[in-house]
Image: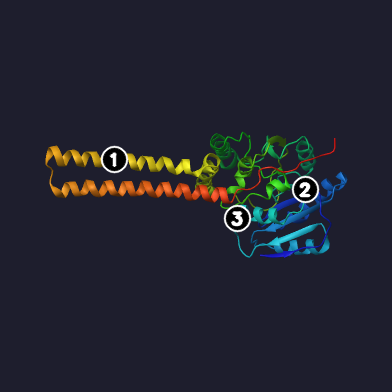
Amino acid sequence: MQAFEKRIAKPFLSIVVPIYNEVENIPRLWQALKDALEPTGKTFEIILVDDGSTDGSRAELRRLAKAHAGIRVILFRANFGQSAAMAAGFEATKGEVVVAMDGDLQNDPQDIVALLQKLDEGYDVVSGWRKNRKDKLLLRKIPSKIANKLICSLTDVQLHDTGCSLKAFRGDLLRRISLYGELHRFIPALLRIEGAQIAEMPVRHHPRRFGKSKYNLSRTFRVIMDLITIRLLLRHLQNPLSFFANFSLACFLAGSISFVKGFYEAVWQHTSFAELNILATLTVLLWATGVQFMFLGLVGKLIVESGSRKTFFLYSRKL
């Protein structure tokens, strides 16, 4: 990964945009962001993260980085995915507020001002809702609605549109989380673990004019696996011992049943030694597995306690 950076004063706002084969959209995106942000009078930086593009996007990003001090560019050596691109962009941010968005111009930069106003009401996360989404019904809208229902039911974060990339965050809170796999879809859920206050508001959505969509149904399995991870984190991050204790108890119970059956067979049924040996082996294995689960829970609890972070931060704003 290479970075082209220009020294600028610490900005109020950081815009993070993952880029993958968007050569035609890049200059239009920069102009649209500039037109939307300059009238606000707030200092800002734009971090464009190229995720291994092969269509000339990298050259265009280099050109923009050299020409404009407000643009910072991160170049990946290969395609690592949207979560990795967002994680790299978030880590590089300096702003008090961070806004994430797609680089295909389907998100409207003019909505950033409204997100900032909503954030200033005291929220930590403001998520966009593509209420009038301009995508294909069968390939995008229907799968998205199903995914939204599933994600909201398992994470307890109630959003109409979990897949919208246009979101605003408080920078100090956002920089505390780690992203991998397809976890960029679950950033609000990850921040909820940190105690974030989350809001949602409708934003505009435009049809794609240039380039090709990167969405495909092959990512569904990875999303499901990450959703299971998020569910476990939400329920058991603070006390992993309770999670492993359930498995430990089940193993001890099953082992005890096996032991009682073996004792009964040996005393009253006079079962052969070979059959009793199977029950004895099963009993020992189940009890040993129960002990292992218990120790895993204890180790997890020690890791959580030793790596615990402060769960508060100072927030102030002009009244």
Mark 1: which secondary structure?
helix
- Decide which of 265, 21 is in the foreground and name it: 265
Mark 2–mark 3 Cα distance, whole angstroms, equals 26 Å
User: What residue would you read off at disc 2?
Assistant: 96
- The answer to whether residue 25 is left or right of residue 79 is right
Mark 1–mark 2 Cα distance, whole angstroms, equals 57 Å
| Residue 72 position in % (x across, y down) | 76, 59
Which quadrant holds the N terminus? bottom right
Q: Residue at x 21, y 48 (%)?
A: 278
- Decide which of 28, 33 is in the foreground and name it: 33
Q: Amino acid at mark 2?
A: Glu
Q: Are marks 1 and 2 in contact (CB under 8 Å)?
A: no
User: What residue would you read off at disc 3?
Assistant: 81
| Residue 273 position in % (x across, y down) | 14, 49
Mark nearer the viewer, 3 or 1: 1
- The answer to whether residue 20 is left or right of residue 12 is left
- The answer to whether residue 150 is left or right of residue 101 is left
| Residue 197 position in % (x across, y down) | 68, 36
Q: Earlier in the sequence, mark 3 or mark 1?
A: 3
Q: Residue at x 20, y 42 (%)?
A: 262
Mark 3–mark 1 Cα distance, whole angstroms, equals 48 Å
Q: Residue at x 48, y 51 (%)?
A: 299
Which quadrant holds the C terminus? top right
Q: Earlier in the sequence, mark 1 or mark 2?
A: 2
Q: Amino acid at mark 3?
A: Gly
Q: Are marks 3 and 1 in contact (CB under 8 Å)?
A: no
